[in-house]
Amino acid sequence: MVTGRAAVSRGSGIPMEIREYPVVDPAPDQLVARITMASICGSDLHMWRGEMPNLGSGAIVPGHEMAGVVHARGRDWQTDSLGRPLKEGDRVTFSFFNPCGKCWACLSGTARCPQRYALRALADDPPHFHGAYAEYHVVKPGQWVFKVPDGLPDELVAPVNCALAQVLYSLHRIRIWLGDTIVIQGAGGLGLYGVAVAREMGAGQIIVVDRIPERLALAREFGADATIDLNELPQRADRVAFVRERTEGRGADVALEVAGVPAVVQEGLDMLRFGGRYCLVGNIVPGAVAEVVPHDIIRTSREVLGVVGYEAWAIPRALEFLARTRMKYPFDRLVSHRYPLAEINRAFQEADWALSAGKVTRAVLVP
Ligand SMILES: [Zn+2]
Ligand SMILES: [Zn+2]
């Protein structure tokens, strides 16, 4: 019998442990992928620190960003989600959530089914491999699977099903017009992807705000036209004035919040022009409160949109985007540290430290 290792989390503050589980033959509607790389996302760190609940109360296999190869297919998985023949050994990536397709949100075309994690189970419940930090992952009905273009390294593929697909879909939803000035609040992985994706969608001026000089330097390498360092402009009014000076007094057309800090919301709104559009993506910690002035949103006819999740098309387009532009943007700089799965606790500690120390980093785990 084939077995595989999985990291198991019993909640924040308790070291994860590596357990061995049987790799069972997939049911007709399941596909078993062998994970070749998984990455540590900001939301994984939120859960690790206890700022967000784990997906499931009890011992679970964490992680959601991953790349892999087809290990075994159930009868229903003859092709990927684009109808391309699928065979054992093919490199694949897949969405992590399972929209039910039968609720009011799904039927209304909302990319955020309330039941989207209902098929997740505890680590001890077969088929065990429900998360990314393991040697295998069992893909279940509702997840989309896509073949990966040749030549794309796993370091670029692993964050596709969360960070990159989310940025691509969010900018689609908030709309980029040719020549738009966009402010990106936060120069972590999402913000850096945001620079490249906004540019490819036709953005004009791209202004990135962060508190860490190294991250802003990387934002400029990705093509940001201007950066705002919170250390240099500690006053909110000065940061808003900076954006207005660079837009002939109008304000930006779009602002994308990928900072994950509630206090930036009103600032982002203040940076917008009349009729400007504000997209919230980063503030995912429950209960974190921001103060906003509703009057300003109404009286300037601004749009405010929150986005989590995406539609199926975001993944193949993200893969194609990477294949086409990987020489144009320093995507390989986004991953800074590699760890074996067995050292997952050290990986989280160092990723957390690197974040607070201002290092640009996305740590990856190699089973
Ligand atoms: Zn993620
Ligand atoms: Zn649904």
Image: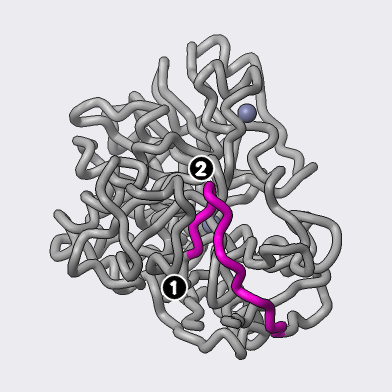
Depth check: give the residue in front, 148 or 298.
148
Give residue 179's quadrant in the image.
Answer: top left
Instruction: Check disc 2 and report the residue beneath it.
Output: 257
Q: Which of marks 1 and 2 precedes in the sequence?
A: 2
Query: Horizontal placement of 30 versus 349: left or right?
Result: left
Mark yes or no: residue 259 visible: no
**Image spot of residue 86 (x, y percent):** 31, 55
Tell me the residue at 44%/59% (across/down). Answer: 73
> Quadrant of the image for the N terminus?
bottom right
Question: Could you tell me which secondary element the residue under label 2 belongs to?
Answer: strand
Residue contact between numbered discs 2 and 1, judged by CB atoms under 8 Å: no
Q: Residues within 10 Å of mark 1 (few under 14, many from 20)?
A: many
Depth check: give the residue in front, 328 or 4.
4
Instruction: Give the answer, above or below, for where 193 lies relative to 342.
Output: above
Q: What residue range appears in magenta?
A: 18-32
Tell me the residue at 74%/80% (across/down). Answer: 16
Tell me the residue at 55%/79% (across/down). Answer: 354
**Image spot of residue 242 (x, y percent):** 38, 42
Instruction: Give the answer, above or below, for where 123 lies relative to 228.
Output: below
Instruction: Check disc 1 and report the residue beneath it.
Output: 360
Q: Residues within 10 Å of mark 2 (few under 14, many from 20)?
A: many
